[in-house]
Image (cartoon, grey):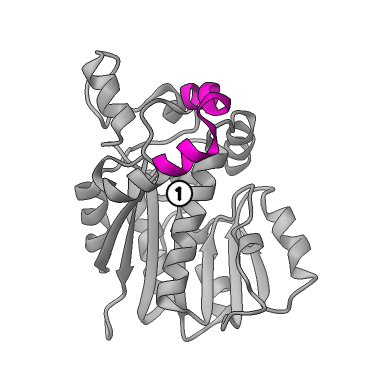
Amino acid sequence: MRAASSNASKLISAEDYAQKYLADMGFEHNLITARQDCCLEFLADCQPHTVLEVGCGPDLLIDRFDLAGSAIRKWVVVEPSSYADDFERRIKHSNKLALTRGYLEDQVPVLRDHLPGGFDAVLLSGLLHETTQPANMLNAAHDLLRDGGHLFVSVPNANSFHRLLAVEMGMMDSPTQLSDRNLELGHPVVYNRESLTEVIEDAGFQPEQFSGYMFKPFSNGQMAAILKTIGDDVVDGLNSLGKIFPDNAAEIAISARKPVNS
């Protein structure tokens, strides 16, 4: 049975999300860099020849990847918002790049046409917490991966230190409570290590590695306000601390495999 349109699983439209996200970047730029660093480490580890990137965002990962010097034969982006415009301009300069506009869950047949045998790697970076139906997104990724293919999933962490601090201050009832920013962006859930692992396993994947990045003691707005004071060296140190203490990092990631003959 074909899944319902993914528009129904998002609390706000892709374009509304994109514009609200851009309106308050601040410390988010630092998180994007840390998130992309984690993606690049994943790609260096699994050495795929074909990549499906779900959602390219406002700062393109491909701009930080040495496509010409890599073994990548095809890099496909599926993106429903105007963020896709920048990626489309990159396509003119490389026959290895391709773009499909729309939500992953709705574009499975189109994306399968790119590689009927399945992709080597699928990137779901900073996305799973944006849908009310994560199983649909993960099932689509499962369908598009080859047997033995690699999945990367990253999300904000409910057990981030800044959330634990908010609970101790009486500002939140629990670490998984949705913040004002979550509500503004239409996030229906905040994952921790256990809940993220569970939803990935339920979709038929085998988690292989858990990691975290960026130790964030305060909210994004508060971090943005002190960036000039603390400087880049402190931010780099905070990113390293997130890797040392992943369970309390600002964001967490899981690398997983699609079992052979699954």
SS class of the residue under badge 1?
A: loop
Disc 1 residue type? Gly
Residue 219: x, y in percent? Answer: 42, 26
The residue drawn where x is 29% and y is 32% is 161
The residue drawn where x is 33% and y is 50% is 243
Furthest toward the top, the residue is: 170
The residue drawn where x is 39% and y is 52% is 154
- Say if residue 109 shows up in the picture: no
Start-end of magenta stretch: 221-238
Residue 164: x, y in percent? Answer: 25, 27
Task: Give the crowd class for mark 1: few <14, some 14-19, many >=20 residues within 10 Å.
Answer: many
Where the N terminus falls, by quadrant?
Answer: bottom left
The residue drawn where x is 50% and y is 23% is 221
Residue 229: x, y in percent? Answer: 54, 24
Q: Image check: 261 left or right of 61?
A: left
Residue tagged by mark 1? 126
Tell me if residue 90 comes above or below residue 114 in the rendering.
Answer: above
Q: Image check: 75 left or right of 256?
A: right
- Say if residue 25 shows up in the picture: yes
Task: Judge whether residue 228 is colored magenta.
Answer: yes
Q: Image check: 6 left or right of 261?
A: right
Q: Main secondary structure of the magenta part?
A: helix
